[in-house]
Image (cartoon, grey):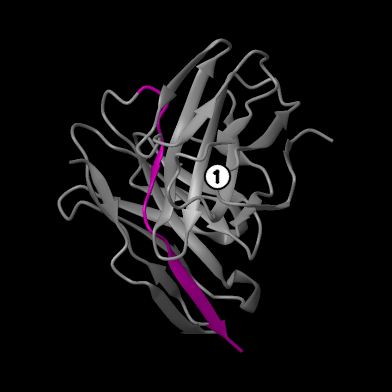
Amino acid sequence: AQSVAQPEDQVNVAEGNPLTVKCTYSVSGNPYLFWYVQYPNRGLQFLLKYITGDNLVKGSYGFEAEFNKSQTSFHLKKPSALVSDSALYFCAFTPKGGDDKIIFGKGTRLHILP
Amino acid sequence: DGGITQSPKYLFRKEGQNVTLSCEQNLNHDAMYWYRQDPGQGLRLIYYSQIVNDFQKGDIAEGYSVSREKKESFPLTVTSAQKNPTAFYLCASQGQTWGELFFGEGSRLTVL
């Protein structure tokens, strides 16, 4: 079955350090991949997407993600973490033949320590 | 302001009762979605609609029903057949930019 996996339930990073939130995918054909962020008791906000083209995708709030076909990964990164980056992060994808379906991973909680 | 409005924000229901969650958008988006969020399980797709008067089941449609009579409205009914309805429900729409969903603030349903 097609899916994305977020292997870490929680990631802790000190403020100012680089952060990485991991996502691996198992998707048929060329994947459409996305990252979203959720702040407490709120809806999700779109950060970035990979459809085709450059493997390094830049998004909102200084985040970027690198599509790696050989490792089937789409890790979210930021060079310098802020306390305000603390939130729940979701990787998502569109299944092949799935019309407009967008399927989410289980999420990774990111804690930025001051 | 344009966006997605979900109501009510909090809802309590007795077992055996149906409840309808409202989702309205003024973004002129064609596609709309309902997701359920449970701790540790991420978001799971309940139903989605790509156009008025048409909708498709997602991964966990059992015990839920929807309608799409108007472009701007996509209400979700949680029926008494849903065995574990206590959850956070999120509605979203998608516009011209593929994959960019706009989410409402969510409705938290608690079954007593």
Q: Nearer the viewer, residue B44 or A46?
A: B44
Residue B36 location, x and y as percent? 49, 47
Residue B60 location, x and y as percent? 38, 39
Placement of B89 over or under B58, stated as above or below: below
Extreme-left residue of the structure: A70
Please state which amino acid type lies under the numbered disc 1: Gly
**Residue at 69% of width from left, 34% of height from top?**
B22
Q: Secondary structure at mark 1?
A: loop
**Residue at 29% of width from left, 33% of height from top?**
A95
On the rendered image, what quadrant is the C terminus of chain A found in? bottom right
Q: Nearer the viewer, residue A77 or B85?
A: B85
What are the residue bounds of the magenta stretch?
A: A99-114
Chain name for mark 1 = B
Q: Which residue is mark 1?
A: B16
Asked whether A107 falls inside the magenta stretch, the response is yes
**Residue at 65% of width from left, 61% of height from top?**
A41
Q: Quadrant of residue B110?
A: bottom right
Classify mark 1: residues with Cα within 10 Å, few (<14), some (14-19) or many (20+). Answer: few
Residue B69 location, x and y as percent? 64, 13
Residue B89: tell me if it is visible: yes
Q: Nearer the viewer, residue B65 or B72?
A: B65
Placement of B60 over or under A24, stated as above or below: above
On the rendered image, what quadrant is the N terminus of chain A found in? top left
